Amino acid sequence: MSVPHPGGDPNAHLYEQLKRDVLERVPHIRTIGYIPDAIEATHLRATFDPDRIDPPTGPEPPELQITWYRGTSRDWFRVNYHDPNTNFHAGWHQDEDHPSLGPAHFQYATDDEQDRWGVTFAHETPSLILWEIIEELLEEVLPTYQ
């Protein structure tokens, strides 16, 4: 069961900033969209070109879903990756789901295993945190766990 976010609506301007400053600059990403739409955005969704993922994954585009709420002491966010070709899931969460791991954690799941551990980010700015996450996903997580 997931602990609900600490209240308020996602910041549409923040989603536009994440889209413009990060997602549109990642050459692996094919499409970017707001869920449900640009007016009532509650999430961002980006799909990856499966031919640009290393190791290659298959014909269906892997997906990155981002939910981000600005907070007074700390932002609440979830950045989740899913590859339908391999059934690999990875997520970076800063929420209240696993307090024993600290304020933020990484988790992954394959058909054979799953694990999670606490993480820290070098930056505090949402765009820079998202850059960190995508770099880790592409350079470390996918080659190691997928």
Image (cartoon, grey):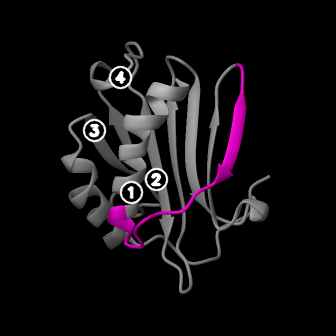
> Disc 3 on helix, strand or loop?
strand
Between disc 4 and disc 2, the foreground one is: 4
Question: What residue range appears in magenta?
Answer: 112-128
Q: Nearer the viewer, residue 92 or 85?
A: 92
| Mark closer to the observer (3, 4) | 4
Asked whether the residues under the numbered discs 2 and 1 touch, taking CB atoms below 8 Å apart as contact, a structural biologist would say: yes
Q: Residues within 10 Å of mark 1 (few under 14, many from 20)?
A: many
Q: Amino acid at mark 4?
A: Asp
Pointer 3: what residue? 31
Q: Earlier in the sequence, mark 4 or mark 1?
A: 4
Q: Which residue is mark 4?
A: 54
User: Nearest the camera: 101 or 51?
Assistant: 101
Q: Amino acid at mark 2?
A: Ile
Q: Amino acid at mark 1?
A: Leu
State the image coordinates of residue 63 (x, y, percent, origin top left): 43, 35
> Residue placed at 72% from the left, 26% from the top?
113
N-term mark: 3 or 1: 3
- Determine which of the numbered discs, if any, sits on residue 130 in the image: 1
Report crowding for label 3: few under 14, some 14 to 19, many 20 or more residues within 10 A (C-alpha).
Answer: some
Marks 3/2 in contact by CB < 8 Å: the verdict is no
Disc 3 to disc 4, C-alpha distance: 18 Å
